[in-house]
Amino acid sequence: MAYDCGLRDFGENYMQDWFSKKDDLPSDIRWHFIGHIQSNKAKKIAAAAHMLHSVDSLHLFEEINRRALEMSRIMPCLIEVNVGGEASKGGVEPEKLPELIESVSRMSNIDLRGLMSIPPFLDDAEEMRPFHATLRELRDKMERVADMKLPELSMGMSFDMEVAIEEGATIVRVGTDIFGRRT
């Protein structure tokens, strides 16, 4: 139904779920992979994704770059930043972001498009605003420091998308409001 309404960008958190459905759906869907990426699955993901949202280490970028080079492809990617400092979540620490961006900017088959975050889940969406603002401020600073454009900010989900948009989100992940909760 979402496709029939014109939606063409779809995201998936889990590779197994994505690959079990992608071949049964129209081929013009632009798949965004937003889940944790294991380096041993990088080739398969890089071959099928329109954009990778959750790349958070130099090692993973090197693997994706190598796989994209093998496929003669430029891979659009976002760096996941751990804006909440949560040990249970992925993402590069904000203070390590400049070094990672500098390294990634030299990779021939990576198109670094921006930043992504999954802030701590709080009971009030308004309490999540500082985390979204932090990601936007980091992006703005990195654009100046690295002298490059990072146009995409992937932040906000169904619960806090309005706040994320107010803070500059260009991509929001609204799966729960469209498809319902995962079982």
Image (tube, rainbow, N blue to C red):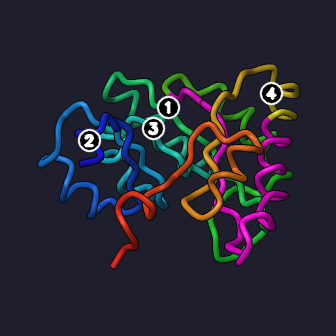
Q: Nearer the viewer, residue 156 or 14?
A: 156
39 relative to 23 in the view: left or right: right
* Residue bearing mark 3: 51
Q: Tell me where residue 98 sits by quadrant.
A: top right
State how far apart marks 2 and 1 are (Cα). 22 Å
Which residue is under mark 4?
143
Q: Position of residue 54 (x, y in %)?
A: 55, 52
Q: Which of the two discs, 3 and 1, labels the residue nearer the N terminus?
A: 3
Type of amino acid under label 4: Glu
Q: Amino acid at mark 3?
A: Met
Inspect the image, locate mark 1, and give the three-letter code of the amino acid beneath it. Pro
Tell me whether the residue at label 3 lies in contact with that at label 1, contact meaning CB atoms closer than 8 angstroms: yes
Looking at the image, is mark 4 or mark 2 earlier in the sequence? 2
Q: Which residue is mark 2?
A: 3
Say which element carries label 3: strand
First reached walking from the N terminus: tag 4 or tag 1: 1
Q: Which residue is mark 1?
A: 76
Helix, strand or loop at label 1? It is strand
Q: Residues within 10 Å of mark 3 (few under 14, many from 20)?
A: many
> With respect to residue 134, does 143 lie above or below?
above
